[in-house]
Each structure stands twice: as C-alpha cells, then as structure tokens.
Amino acid sequence: MAVVVAGKHSWDLTPREAAALQRRLQAEVICEDRIGAVEYVAGVDVGFEQSGRVTRAAVAVLTFPGLELCEHALAREPTRFPYVPGLLSFREIPAILTALQQLRCSPDLVLCDAHGRAHPRRFGLASHLGLLLDLPSIGVAKSRLIGDHDPVPPQRGASVALRDRGETIGAVLRTRAATRPVYVSIGHRLSLATCIDYVLACTPRFRLPETTRWADRLASDRDRRRRARSTSTATIKR
DNA sequence: GCGACAG
DNA sequence: ATCTTGTCGC
C-alpha cells in the first residue's frame, strides 16, 4: 500500500506563521509507543543542488531487521522556504512528501536526518513528518540544535540524556565507537527508549553491502563534483 | 545587547 | 548545507 499523507496544511507561510503552526501542532505529537510490527523502515535525507534553489529528497526503504534495500525514490523541487534554524521542515518536507508518494510500499517506521522533539518548540522535522503521515518516526541528527548533556561514554550503545528547561528532550547516542554520537529524539508515536532501540537496530557495527551501495548512489553526484574539483586543483598546482 | 543556531 | 587546511589513525 502506498504512502498516504494524512494531515495537510499550507506551506505558503512566513517564518512567523510557521513557528505559530509548530506551537499548535506540537500538542498532537504522541510520545508513547503506538507502533505495530515493523517490516519496512524508511530513511529520509535531503540535499541541495549547487544553485541552492533546488531541493533534492531521497528516501530509501529497507527491510527490518535485515536492512536490505527494497525500494527507493528521489524528488527534485524548487526550494521555497529559507533555511531558518528551527524551521527546517518547512524547507524540506514538501520535497520529502513528493519522494514518499512515489513509493509502492508504505514503511512502518521513518528515520529522519533531523531532530524531532529536541527542538525549541518540540516540533522538529521528524515530528512534523511523522504527524503528517501518521507514522512512527524518529529524529536522528548529526549535531545539536538545543539542549545540554554530559559527556557520552565511548562504547557503541552508550547514551546520555539531552535536556532542555528541566525536561528530557532526547538522547545523545553512540552508534559506533570512535565516531561522533548522534542526537536521537522522538518524532511521533514512539517512546524515547524505543527510539534508541530502533536506531541501534538500524546501525549495525558493520555496514551491509546493500547499505553501502545505496550510500554510494546517493553520494554519486556530490563525489563526482568533488573529484572534478580536486583533479582541476591538482592540475593547477602542477 | 550578545551568542547560538537541525540541514 | 558547503568550502578548506592540516593532522591523526587505520
């Protein structure tokens, strides 16, 4: 069954209106486990073309827990909202929805390269997307937006609480030893403990061949440009 | 007023 | 997000 967008609202908003919408929708996020059997898990990421005016969204659907690639989709759309810290979803979600709607199967869980509840108004991209799709979702960000935390012990699986204004808003989790930890937070329809379990289940110590192949495909354009640049630089140096 | 600020 | 230089570790 295809992905269905359950919720809808205007995307033609000013930054001020967008923040007001976040404050309203934040109350509808479910922070308890309302999740069934997980057979397919989707990973969502976006990038921008060199002009900066085109947003590209990539979605990969993997089997769970085997993590074999079974479907993917790409979308290119004009960027119609500026990057404002805290309003990332208004820039990225329209293209993500386009990509998701091309899928033939609907995932049971969505992992996002962004924050969920670890957000100033408790409504990061992962929560926004999860609510629109009415699907369990998790925020997995590479860097901090808000909150404070203690140092994270060095071994895989170690985590510490991410706190803001006296509240636990997420966890800082090591998915691999000797790399930077990731910032995990509830997107929608999951408890924080369950979010951590799924992130660890989706980030095994050794990359599967399918995962590597998919990452290569996503990075191909960027790598091609980088290679061309370093080649020309090397030529100039000589 | 100043710093901080997912991607 | 992107770009760069130097440095470290496998």
Image: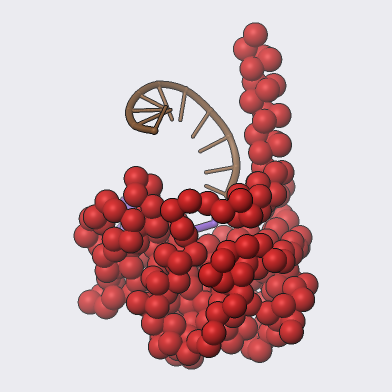
Chain colours: A red, B purple, C brown
Q: Is residue A185 left or right of residue A25?
A: left
For the point 42% across and 65% down, which residue is it? Answer: A200
> Where is A138 relative to A59, above or below?
below
Task: Tell which of A162 and A111 is nearer to you.
Answer: A111
Residue at the outermost top position: A238
For the point 65% across and 34% down, which residue is it? Answer: A226
- Which corner quadrant holds the N terminus of chain A? bottom right
Task: Tell which of A66 and C3 is nearer to you.
Answer: A66
Q: Position of residue A2 (x, y in %)?
A: 74, 82
Q: Is residue A202 left or right of residue A182?
A: right
> Where is A129 relative to A96, above or below?
below
Residue A203 shows in the view: yes
Q: Is residue A197 left or right of residue A222?
A: left
Q: Count all numbered tags in the image, as a single digit.
A: 0
Residue A91 shows in the view: no
Q: Position of residue A169 (x, y in %)?
A: 33, 74
Q: Quadrant of residue A220?
A: top right
For the point 43% across and 87% down, which residue is it? Answer: A33
Task: Tell which of A185 and A13 is nearer to you.
Answer: A185
Residue at the outermost front position: A66
Q: Position of residue A49 (x, y in %)?
A: 70, 49
> Where is A68 relative to A12, above or below?
above
Task: Tell which of A213 and A192 is nearer to you.
Answer: A213
Q: Quadrant of residue A9?
A: bottom right
Q: Position of residue A158 (x, y in %)?
A: 29, 61
- Which corner quadrant holds the C terminus of chain A? top right
For the point 29% across and 63% down, which residue is it? Answer: A159
